[in-house]
Image: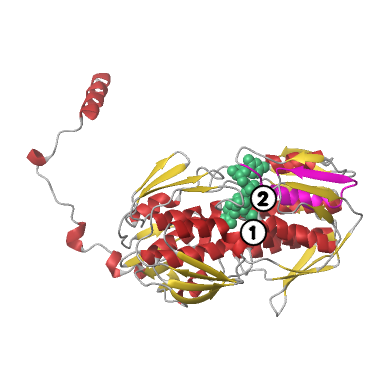
Amino acid sequence: MDMLVVRGGHPLRGTVTVGGAKNAALPIMAAALVAEGTTVLHGVPELVDVTTLSHVLRSLGASAERRADGALEIRVVDQQPCLADYELVRRMRASVCVLGPLLGRRHRACVSLPGGCNIGHRPIDLHLKGLRALGAEITIERGYVFARADRLVGADVYLGGSFGSTVTGTCNVLSAAVLAEGTTTISAAACEPEVVDLGNMLIAMGARIEGLGTPLLRIDGVEALNAVEHTVIPDRIEAATLMVAAAMTRGELTIENVRPAHLAAVTDVLRVAGTRVEFHGSTAHVRMTGAPRPVDVTALPYPGVPTDVQAQLTALLALADGISVVTDKVFPDRFMHIPELMRLGASIRREGASAIINGTPRMSGACVMASDLRASAALLLAALASDGESVIRRVYHLDRGYERLERKLNSVGADIRRVPDDPDNMPQSLQLSVDEQSVPTMDSSDTPPPPKFLRHAENKEATVRR
Ligand code: EPZ
């Protein structure tokens, strides 16, 4: 297991390039299962999650090989296997994206229910509701979803839930509906660019889809779909993460391979916070001098501020010159990064689905623990903006969703070293000296009396003991 040793305080300056979108690549890789022939995907990032899904596809009778030019080739060689097993789905919940394509083309699927997740409760009830509407018989037994359908028939489906639309749920229903008989409408469909990217690839394969990017999709089912070459859209979450990194370190970054339209909400927050953001074609120029201004932020389904950037913006606003409120309406519990940011000196209080951030002029290095993909990115950014050295442990979370992020950041002035997670690698500056370790002794006369409520409890207990 690795950890990152970060020496903070360096403004980032230079040019970085954004990779392909993880959250587009995963459903698109799964959708290759519906096509006849070899699907060739360009711009698929080299991530742990992509590797995991490649293993899932191979277990489902498909080949998934990276070509020398970096393209990913996926070809279905055997339609028989239909089990996405617990071990693989446990490793990556997005493996559930194979459910719709398997039902669409093979009319049967057995997919492990995704396990728990550090960002909150993540059911798939809406996925199953949509697939049942298309005629699938679905049962849940022994932790698995068993789905089968003699035939899939188009239907009107409503996919809205208590927290808005569902991104992978829309992908699953879309990937099944394209091969259903007749017309399907999906209301309250997710509008995320990643869903649009999947839809565009399916259309190139021969699917008939209208309304991509809007909450109402109309799909006219077809008999078969043919494999195509497709280039995955740039990762708007990585782009946003790099924009926040420039703002937090009060640097100046040129960020290439972005889609400005996908970054409107994050750009607005950064501009309100005082960051200069300009776009020239597919390049963003981000520059920050001085402390960010406080901003109230609410994470919402697209086109709102992405929940996947909430942790990074929370880290930024920890350095604002005032009080900000960050609310996550998509994953109300997605605040595991807060206690770790506080170890770096942030002053944040949880209030339900919100974080009240009392900005501080500076943060100082500490040893912190990553808990999930975007929290690890937020901690890395905070460490870059902190005085002195920090250590971020469990960086395997980061590797799931960012392709060599520390190399990209080091190329523009960061000082990040990836080392084995070993006490010998802990920086001297983070180790307590011997005399610091000796807790100051207090003689009994100095020991304050226990607080009244404790005294009461102790007396009560003593009474009971007697
Ligand atoms: C996708 O997850 C992304 N993952 C997530 O990114 C992202 O945070 C999320 O969409 C929201 O944008 C991939 O695309 C692989 P949802 P997904 O279904 O599809 C509730 C990252 O860091 N819900 O849109 O699983 C759910 O609990 C990851 O890259 C139901 O209630 O999210 C949540 O509150 C993390 N029932 C809300 O809807 C369902 O059947 C949105 O979830 C499905 C979801």
Q: Is mark 1 within 8 Å of ligand 1?
A: yes
Image vertical order of residue 334 relative to residue 129, above or below: below
Which element carries disc 1, helix, strand or loop?
Answer: helix
Q: Dot 1: within a 10 Å radius of its alpha carbon, few (fewer than 14), some, or many (20 or more) residues?
A: many
Determine the CA span between mark 1 and mark 2: 9 Å
> Residue 110 appears at what percent x and percent y?
76, 47
The magenta region covers 164-188
Q: Quadrant of the C terminus?
A: top left
Q: Is mark 2 within 8 Å of ligand 1?
A: yes
Q: Which residue is mark 1?
A: 23
Question: Horizontal and vertical percent for residue 381?
Answer: 43, 63
Within 10 Å of disc 2 (Cα), the crowding (few <14, some 14-19, many 20+) is: many
Image side of residue 279 versus residue 349, left or right: right
Determine which residue is flagged by label 2.
167
Check disc 1 and give the amino acid type: Asn
Q: Residue furthest right?
A: 223
Q: Are marks 1 and 2 in contact (CB under 8 Å)?
A: yes
State yes or no: residue 59 in magenta: no
Tell me the residue at 74%/54% (across/down): 212
80 or 75: nearer the eye? 75
Q: How far across and how far down the image is residue 186, in percent?
A: 76, 44
Q: Secondary structure at mark 2?
A: helix
What percent of the width, then of the height, locates residue 455? 21, 27
Q: Mark 1 or mark 2, which has the lower sequence index?
A: 1
Q: Please state if 77 lies on the left or on the right of 169 as rendered.
A: right
Residue in view at x 77 percent, y 40 percent: 157
Which label sits on residue 196?
A: none
State the residue at coordinates (63%, 62%). 22
